[in-house]
Amino acid sequence: MIKIKSEQYYIQPHTAIKNLSTYEDFGLSEKVLEEQLEDTRKKLGELQDTLYAHGKYAVLVCLQGMDTAGKDSLVREVFKDFNARGVVVHSFKVPTELERKHDYLWRHYIALPARGKFGVFNRTHYENVLVTRVHPGYILGEYLPNVKSVKDIDDAFWENRFEQINAFEKIISQNGTIIFKFFLNLSKEEQKNRLLRRLEKREKHWKFSPDDLKERELWEAYQACYEDAVNRTSKPHAPWYNIPADNKPAARLLVASILLTVLQAYTDIKEPDLDPDVKAKIDEYKEQLEHE
């Protein structure tokens, strides 16, 4: 079993995305990577049971990355051995009319996991400083009182939004939510290959949209926004991890391993002891059942 040091993938302040790796295989074959993932996710599933019984922490897993970065398949493979009641996945799309009647963080706040559970945000509150920053016109749909036109969406606007996101994460962290933020770092060449596969394989046609190509043309703008976002918001209580995403099996193993390593360090997460009176009568209860 490979030993992964989570801090090795932690995104430090003043990090240039172009200097981060997009490919990893740990020197292992795809088969071995999948076998190690299977072992790791089983341990994660067992840990989730303990987390639920303990009942004092929630875990929020945030996944961000360019189109085709592998978010959906990562969720499927990493959390496969969880109790279905122990993990809730939210995939945030274009805000609904109801959601636009609230502040942009509202729909994320109400989707947070309860204590004892894992919550996965497949695309996250960071869309509000990524997609909207590349397409500032989208902000006009939020009906903000001080934004009359795109000209009002200046550097101060984004500075305030980053402060709000940092405050949001600090509040939930201080109240028992353990936060993981994974940047699935995909190369432009690999995205091209994955888009081509969607066009070449009939069963994958449904995943393709012409808008994918329009967004691809804005690759550099997105990279600049990602770099700014992760640098401004990677904090000890809410760290960003760089996940090389060109190799899906390795990316899945890396995410699962970081989750397991960090959570195992919480030595207070353990099953509660039985009430002493109940514990003292266990043999009596067993005998009662056996002699029904």
Image: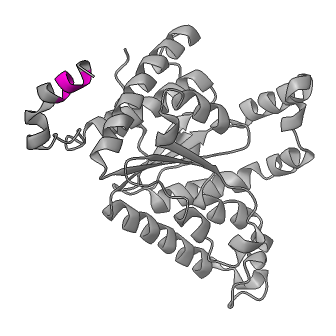
Q: Residue at x 37, y 14 (%)?
A: 1
The image quarter in which residue 272 lies = top left
Q: Tell whether position 215 is magenta.
A: no
- Rendered position, 233 above or below 241: below
Looking at the picture, how far across and down is residue 7, in whole percent? 35, 39
The image quarter in which residue 156 lies = bottom right
Looking at the picture, how far across and down is residue 109, in whole percent? 52, 65
Q: Is residue 290 left or right of residue 91?
A: left
- Rendered position, 143 above or below 267: below
- Rendered position, 126 above or below 46: below
Q: Residue at x 64, y 65 (%)?
A: 128
> Would you say residue 186 is visible in this rendering?
no
Looking at the picture, how far across and down is residue 93, in whole percent? 73, 56
Q: Main secondary structure of the magenta part?
A: helix
Q: Is residue 291 left or right of residue 212?
A: left
Colouring of the image: one colour
The image quarter in which residue 280 lies = top left
- Observer-nearest of 247 and 145: 145
- Rendered position, 81 above or below 138: above
Q: How many marks?
A: 0
Q: Residue at x 73, y 43 (%)?
A: 67
Give, as a single range, the part of the protein colored magenta: 285-289
- Quadrant location of the C terminus in the rendered image: top left
Looking at the picture, how far across and down is residue 166, in whole percent? 45, 67
Q: Is residue 10 left or right of residue 268?
A: right
> Would you say residue 44 is visible in this rendering?
yes
- Observer-nearest of 16 and 162: 162
- Observer-nearest of 60 and 224: 60
